[in-house]
Protein backbone atom coordinates (compact mmCIF):
# COMPACT_ATOMS: atom_id res chain seq x y z
CA UNK A 1 0.00 0.00 0.00
CA UNK A 2 2.76 2.39 0.96
CA UNK A 3 4.71 1.50 -2.21
CA UNK A 4 1.65 2.09 -4.41
CA UNK A 5 1.07 5.47 -2.74
CA UNK A 6 4.68 6.48 -3.40
CA UNK A 7 4.28 5.55 -7.09
CA UNK A 8 1.13 7.66 -7.41
CA UNK A 9 2.76 10.67 -5.80
CA UNK A 10 6.08 10.38 -7.68
CA UNK A 11 6.95 13.62 -9.49
CA UNK A 12 5.94 13.66 -13.18
CA UNK A 13 8.79 13.80 -15.71
CA UNK A 14 8.15 15.61 -18.97
CA UNK A 15 8.88 13.51 -22.06
CA UNK A 16 11.67 14.57 -24.37
CA UNK A 17 10.71 15.61 -27.94
CA UNK A 18 11.99 12.26 -29.28
CA UNK A 19 9.96 10.33 -26.68
CA UNK A 20 6.83 12.30 -27.55
CA UNK A 21 7.23 11.43 -31.24
CA UNK A 22 7.85 7.74 -30.45
CA UNK A 23 4.67 7.68 -28.38
CA UNK A 24 2.63 9.21 -31.20
CA UNK A 25 4.04 6.75 -33.77
CA UNK A 26 3.21 3.81 -31.49
CA UNK A 27 -0.39 4.99 -31.11
CA UNK A 28 -0.63 5.33 -34.91
CA UNK A 29 1.05 1.91 -35.29
CA UNK A 30 3.89 3.43 -37.32
CA UNK A 31 6.81 1.13 -36.57
CA UNK A 32 9.89 3.01 -37.71
CA UNK A 33 13.57 2.20 -37.47
CA UNK A 34 15.98 4.15 -35.30
CA UNK A 35 17.13 7.54 -36.47
CA UNK A 36 20.20 7.31 -38.74
CA UNK A 37 23.43 8.49 -37.16
CA UNK A 38 24.97 11.40 -39.06
CA UNK A 39 28.26 10.20 -40.56
CA UNK A 40 30.92 12.03 -42.52
CA UNK A 41 33.64 11.13 -45.01
CA UNK A 42 36.83 12.82 -43.88
CA UNK A 43 38.89 13.01 -47.09
CA UNK A 44 42.01 14.05 -45.10
CA UNK A 45 42.28 16.95 -47.56
CA UNK A 46 41.26 20.36 -46.22
CA UNK A 47 40.44 21.71 -49.70
CA UNK A 48 38.11 18.84 -50.60
CA UNK A 49 36.47 18.92 -47.18
CA UNK A 50 35.74 22.66 -47.31
CA UNK A 51 34.42 22.70 -50.91
CA UNK A 52 32.23 19.60 -50.58
CA UNK A 53 31.15 19.96 -46.96
CA UNK A 54 32.77 20.89 -43.66
CA UNK A 55 36.44 21.70 -43.16
CA UNK A 56 36.36 20.06 -39.74
CA UNK A 57 34.26 16.98 -40.53
CA UNK A 58 34.44 16.30 -44.27
CA UNK A 59 31.66 15.37 -46.70
CA UNK A 60 28.30 14.24 -45.26
CA UNK A 61 26.52 11.00 -46.07
CA UNK A 62 22.74 11.24 -46.35
CA UNK A 63 22.92 14.23 -48.71
CA UNK A 64 22.54 14.99 -52.42
CA UNK A 65 25.53 16.59 -54.18
CA UNK A 66 25.56 18.19 -57.63
CA UNK A 67 28.93 18.38 -59.43
CA UNK A 68 28.65 20.44 -62.61
CA UNK A 69 30.94 21.85 -65.27
CA UNK A 70 31.70 21.91 -68.98
CA UNK A 71 32.96 18.91 -70.90
CA UNK A 72 36.47 17.55 -70.24
CA UNK A 73 36.88 19.47 -66.98
CA UNK A 74 37.37 16.36 -64.82
CA UNK A 75 33.88 15.93 -63.30
CA UNK A 76 33.73 12.15 -63.67
CA UNK A 77 37.34 11.72 -62.55
CA UNK A 78 36.73 13.73 -59.37
CA UNK A 79 33.48 11.87 -58.65
CA UNK A 80 35.34 8.55 -59.01
CA UNK A 81 38.10 9.82 -56.72
CA UNK A 82 35.46 10.59 -54.08
CA UNK A 83 34.02 7.10 -54.65
CA UNK A 84 37.45 5.58 -53.95
CA UNK A 85 37.75 7.57 -50.72
CA UNK A 86 34.25 6.49 -49.67
CA UNK A 87 35.09 2.86 -50.47
CA UNK A 88 38.16 3.03 -48.22
CA UNK A 89 35.84 4.50 -45.59
CA UNK A 90 33.77 1.29 -45.72
CA UNK A 91 31.00 2.48 -48.03
CA UNK A 92 29.39 0.37 -50.75
CA UNK A 93 29.89 2.02 -54.16
CA UNK A 94 27.30 2.17 -56.94
CA UNK A 95 28.08 3.74 -60.35
CA UNK A 96 25.18 4.58 -62.67
CA UNK A 97 26.96 5.01 -66.01
CA UNK A 98 24.31 6.58 -68.23
CA UNK A 99 26.93 7.98 -70.64
CA UNK A 100 28.86 4.72 -71.14
CA UNK A 101 31.95 6.72 -70.20
CA UNK A 102 32.98 4.83 -67.06
CA UNK A 103 36.30 3.06 -67.65
CA UNK A 104 37.31 0.35 -65.17
CA UNK A 105 41.06 0.75 -65.79
CA UNK A 106 40.91 4.52 -65.33
CA UNK A 107 38.78 4.07 -62.21
CA UNK A 108 41.37 1.65 -60.80
CA UNK A 109 44.08 4.25 -61.42
CA UNK A 110 41.99 6.70 -59.40
CA UNK A 111 41.97 4.24 -56.48
CA UNK A 112 38.68 2.37 -56.89
CA UNK A 113 38.58 -1.39 -56.22
CA UNK A 114 36.42 -2.53 -59.15
CA UNK A 115 35.76 -5.95 -57.60
CA UNK A 116 33.53 -4.23 -55.04
CA UNK A 117 31.66 -1.80 -57.30
CA UNK A 118 28.08 -2.12 -58.61
CA UNK A 119 28.05 -0.74 -62.18
CA UNK A 120 24.64 -0.09 -63.74
CA UNK A 121 24.33 0.88 -67.42
CA UNK A 122 21.42 1.33 -69.86
CA UNK A 123 20.46 -2.00 -71.39
CA UNK A 124 18.74 -3.21 -74.53
CA UNK A 125 16.19 -5.95 -73.92
CA UNK A 126 12.60 -7.01 -73.33
CA UNK A 127 10.80 -5.54 -70.34
CA UNK A 128 7.72 -6.97 -68.69
CA UNK A 129 5.35 -8.60 -71.18
CA UNK A 130 6.54 -6.53 -74.13
CA UNK A 131 7.42 -8.57 -77.22
CA UNK A 132 9.97 -6.32 -78.87
CA UNK A 133 13.36 -5.13 -77.70
CA UNK A 134 14.00 -1.54 -76.66
CA UNK A 135 16.35 0.52 -74.55
CA UNK A 136 15.62 0.78 -70.86
CA UNK A 137 14.21 4.15 -69.76
CA UNK A 138 15.51 6.41 -67.01
CA UNK A 139 12.51 5.54 -64.83
CA UNK A 140 13.27 1.80 -65.09
CA UNK A 141 17.01 2.33 -64.73
CA UNK A 142 16.72 4.29 -61.51
CA UNK A 143 14.14 1.86 -60.13
CA UNK A 144 16.93 -0.75 -60.30
CA UNK A 145 19.13 1.66 -58.32
CA UNK A 146 16.42 2.14 -55.71
CA UNK A 147 15.93 -1.61 -55.28
CA UNK A 148 19.69 -2.07 -54.91
CA UNK A 149 19.84 0.62 -52.22
CA UNK A 150 16.96 -1.13 -50.42
CA UNK A 151 18.92 -4.42 -50.45
CA UNK A 152 22.17 -2.83 -49.30
CA UNK A 153 20.38 -1.08 -46.43
CA UNK A 154 18.60 -4.26 -45.32
CA UNK A 155 21.91 -6.14 -45.27
CA UNK A 156 23.58 -3.45 -43.15
CA UNK A 157 21.35 -0.78 -41.61
CA UNK A 158 24.39 1.04 -40.23
CA UNK A 159 26.26 0.88 -43.54
CA UNK A 160 27.28 3.75 -45.80
CA UNK A 161 26.62 3.96 -49.54
CA UNK A 162 28.17 6.13 -52.26
CA UNK A 163 26.21 6.52 -55.52
CA UNK A 164 27.51 8.26 -58.64
CA UNK A 165 24.96 9.15 -61.35
CA UNK A 166 26.74 10.22 -64.55
CA UNK A 167 24.96 12.17 -65.87
CA UNK A 168 21.65 14.03 -65.67
CA UNK A 169 21.79 15.07 -69.33
CA UNK A 170 22.07 11.43 -70.47
CA UNK A 171 18.77 10.35 -68.87
CA UNK A 172 16.23 9.16 -71.45
CA UNK A 173 12.73 9.38 -69.99
CA UNK A 174 9.90 7.11 -71.13
CA UNK A 175 8.17 10.09 -72.74
CA UNK A 176 11.32 10.96 -74.68
CA UNK A 177 11.80 7.36 -75.78
CA UNK A 178 8.18 7.02 -76.94
CA UNK A 179 8.35 10.23 -78.98
CA UNK A 180 11.53 9.24 -80.77
CA UNK A 181 13.76 11.66 -82.64
CA UNK A 182 11.18 13.10 -85.04
CA UNK A 183 8.26 13.58 -82.65
CA UNK A 184 9.90 15.79 -80.03
CA UNK A 185 7.59 18.52 -78.73
CA UNK A 186 7.08 20.92 -75.84
CA UNK A 187 6.09 18.06 -73.51
CA UNK A 188 9.21 16.02 -74.21
CA UNK A 189 11.40 19.10 -73.73
CA UNK A 190 10.26 19.35 -70.11
CA UNK A 191 9.90 15.60 -69.44
CA UNK A 192 13.37 15.33 -67.85
CA UNK A 193 12.67 18.26 -65.52
CA UNK A 194 9.30 16.72 -64.56
CA UNK A 195 10.91 13.35 -63.91
CA UNK A 196 13.70 14.86 -61.81
CA UNK A 197 11.16 16.74 -59.71
CA UNK A 198 9.36 13.47 -58.90
CA UNK A 199 12.61 11.56 -58.37
CA UNK A 200 14.07 14.10 -55.93
CA UNK A 201 10.91 14.15 -53.80
CA UNK A 202 10.92 10.36 -53.71
CA UNK A 203 14.63 9.91 -53.05
CA UNK A 204 15.61 12.68 -50.63
CA UNK A 205 14.21 10.83 -47.60
CA UNK A 206 15.65 7.50 -48.70
CA UNK A 207 19.09 9.05 -49.20
CA UNK A 208 19.03 10.52 -45.69
CA UNK A 209 17.78 7.38 -43.94
CA UNK A 210 20.05 5.00 -45.85
CA UNK A 211 23.20 7.11 -45.29
CA UNK A 212 23.73 7.58 -49.03
CA UNK A 213 26.15 10.11 -50.48
CA UNK A 214 24.43 10.70 -53.83
CA UNK A 215 26.58 12.53 -56.41
CA UNK A 216 24.85 13.72 -59.59
CA UNK A 217 27.20 14.81 -62.37
CA UNK A 218 25.66 17.56 -64.49
CA UNK A 219 26.78 19.37 -67.61
CA UNK A 220 26.70 23.05 -68.40
CA UNK A 221 24.73 23.98 -71.49
CA UNK A 222 24.35 27.38 -73.16
CA UNK A 223 20.95 28.78 -74.13
CA UNK A 224 21.28 31.16 -77.14
CA UNK A 225 19.52 34.47 -76.72
CA UNK A 226 18.86 34.03 -73.03
CA UNK A 227 18.71 37.08 -70.77
CA UNK A 228 21.55 37.33 -68.27
CA UNK A 229 23.83 34.31 -67.88
CA UNK A 230 23.05 31.91 -70.77
CA UNK A 231 24.62 28.95 -68.94
CA UNK A 232 22.31 26.38 -67.37
CA UNK A 233 22.34 22.76 -66.19
CA UNK A 234 19.83 20.24 -67.63
CA UNK A 235 17.10 18.63 -65.56
CA UNK A 236 15.17 21.67 -64.36
CA UNK A 237 15.31 23.26 -60.93
CA UNK A 238 14.55 20.26 -58.70
CA UNK A 239 18.15 19.12 -58.32
CA UNK A 240 19.43 22.54 -57.34
CA UNK A 241 16.70 22.82 -54.71
CA UNK A 242 17.15 19.33 -53.21
CA UNK A 243 20.95 19.21 -53.43
CA UNK A 244 22.54 20.13 -50.11
CA UNK A 245 25.85 20.80 -51.84
CA UNK A 246 26.50 22.22 -55.32
CA UNK A 247 30.02 22.41 -56.70
CA UNK A 248 31.09 23.94 -60.03
CA UNK A 249 34.25 22.66 -61.75
CA UNK A 250 36.10 24.77 -64.33
CA UNK A 251 39.42 24.44 -66.15
CA UNK A 252 41.98 27.22 -65.86
CA UNK A 253 44.87 28.08 -68.15
CA UNK A 254 46.64 25.66 -70.41
CA UNK A 255 47.29 21.94 -69.98
CA UNK A 256 50.03 20.76 -67.63
CA UNK A 257 53.10 20.05 -69.75
CA UNK A 258 56.31 18.11 -69.15
CA UNK A 259 59.03 18.33 -71.79
CA UNK A 260 56.39 19.72 -74.14
CA UNK A 261 54.05 16.77 -73.64
CA UNK A 262 50.53 17.17 -72.10
CA UNK A 263 50.42 15.53 -68.65
CA UNK A 264 47.11 16.79 -67.28
CA UNK A 265 44.81 19.73 -66.64
CA UNK A 266 44.36 22.31 -63.90
CA UNK A 267 41.29 24.15 -62.71
CA UNK A 268 39.14 25.52 -59.92
CA UNK A 269 36.45 24.03 -57.68
CA UNK A 270 33.85 26.49 -56.41
CA UNK A 271 31.10 25.81 -53.88
CA UNK A 272 27.80 27.40 -54.95
CA UNK A 273 25.63 25.96 -52.20
CA UNK A 274 26.54 24.33 -48.90
CA UNK A 275 23.95 23.03 -46.44
CA UNK A 276 26.17 20.20 -45.17
CA UNK A 277 26.17 21.47 -41.59
CA UNK A 278 29.09 20.89 -39.26
CA UNK A 279 30.43 24.41 -39.74
CA UNK A 280 30.14 24.27 -43.53
CA UNK A 281 30.70 27.47 -45.49
CA UNK A 282 29.23 28.49 -48.82
CA UNK A 283 31.54 29.95 -51.47
CA UNK A 284 34.68 27.97 -50.60
CA UNK A 285 37.05 27.40 -53.51
CA UNK A 286 40.11 25.31 -54.29
CA UNK A 287 42.43 24.56 -57.16
CA UNK A 288 42.98 21.11 -58.63
CA UNK A 289 45.45 19.31 -60.84
CA UNK A 290 44.26 16.21 -62.67
CA UNK A 291 47.01 14.13 -64.24
CA UNK A 292 46.33 11.68 -67.05
CA UNK A 293 47.85 8.84 -65.02
CA UNK A 294 45.08 9.19 -62.42
CA UNK A 295 46.83 11.35 -59.83
CA UNK A 296 44.92 14.32 -58.41
CA UNK A 297 46.28 17.17 -56.34
CA UNK A 298 44.31 19.89 -54.55
CA UNK A 299 45.65 23.29 -53.56
CA UNK A 300 44.45 26.85 -53.19
CA UNK A 301 42.85 28.66 -56.13
CA UNK A 302 45.52 31.36 -55.81
CA UNK A 303 48.26 28.79 -56.26
CA UNK A 304 46.63 27.46 -59.41
CA UNK A 305 46.34 31.00 -60.77
CA UNK A 306 50.00 31.69 -59.99
CA UNK A 307 51.02 28.51 -61.83
CA UNK A 308 49.42 29.61 -65.05
CA UNK A 309 45.68 29.41 -64.51
CA UNK A 310 43.65 32.31 -65.86
Image (cartoon, rainbow, N blue to C red):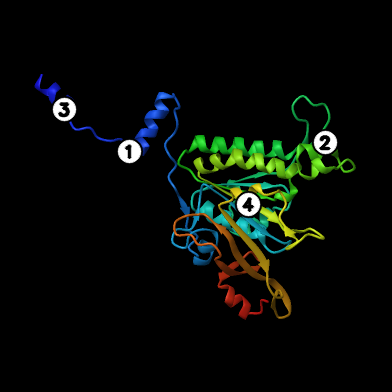
Return the residue nearer the eye: 241 or 35.
Answer: 241
Residues tagged 3 and 4 counted as in contact (Cβ below 8 A): no
- Mark 3 or mark 4: whose residue is earlier in sequence: 3
Q: Mark 4 to mark 2: distance in Å? A: 27 Å
Of tags 3 and 4, which is closer to the observer? 3
Q: Which mark is residue 240?
A: 4
Q: Residue 16 carries which label?
A: 1
Where does label 3 land, which residue? 9
- Picture coordinates of residue 10, whole percent (x, y): 17, 30
Q: Mark 1 to mark 3: distance in Å? A: 21 Å
Name the element at disc 4.
helix
Q: Which mark is residue 178?
A: 2
Residues packed near mark 3 inside 10 Å, few (<14), some (14 to 19) or many (20 plus): few
Tell me what residue is drawn at x 59 percent, y 40 percent: 203
- Mark 2 or mark 1: whose residue is earlier in sequence: 1
- Picture coordinates of residue 221, whole percent (x, y): 76, 58
Residues packed near mark 1 inside 10 Å, few (<14), some (14 to 19) or many (20 plus): few
Amino acid sequence: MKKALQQRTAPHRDLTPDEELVLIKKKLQFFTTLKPVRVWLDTKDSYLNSVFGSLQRGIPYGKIIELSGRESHGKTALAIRLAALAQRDGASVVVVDLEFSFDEVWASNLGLDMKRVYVIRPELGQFGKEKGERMITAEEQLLIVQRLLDRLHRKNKDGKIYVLVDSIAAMMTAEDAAAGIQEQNMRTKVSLATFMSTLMRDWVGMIYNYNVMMVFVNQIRVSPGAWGNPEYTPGGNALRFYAAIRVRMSRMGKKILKAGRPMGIRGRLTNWKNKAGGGSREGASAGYKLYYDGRMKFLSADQIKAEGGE
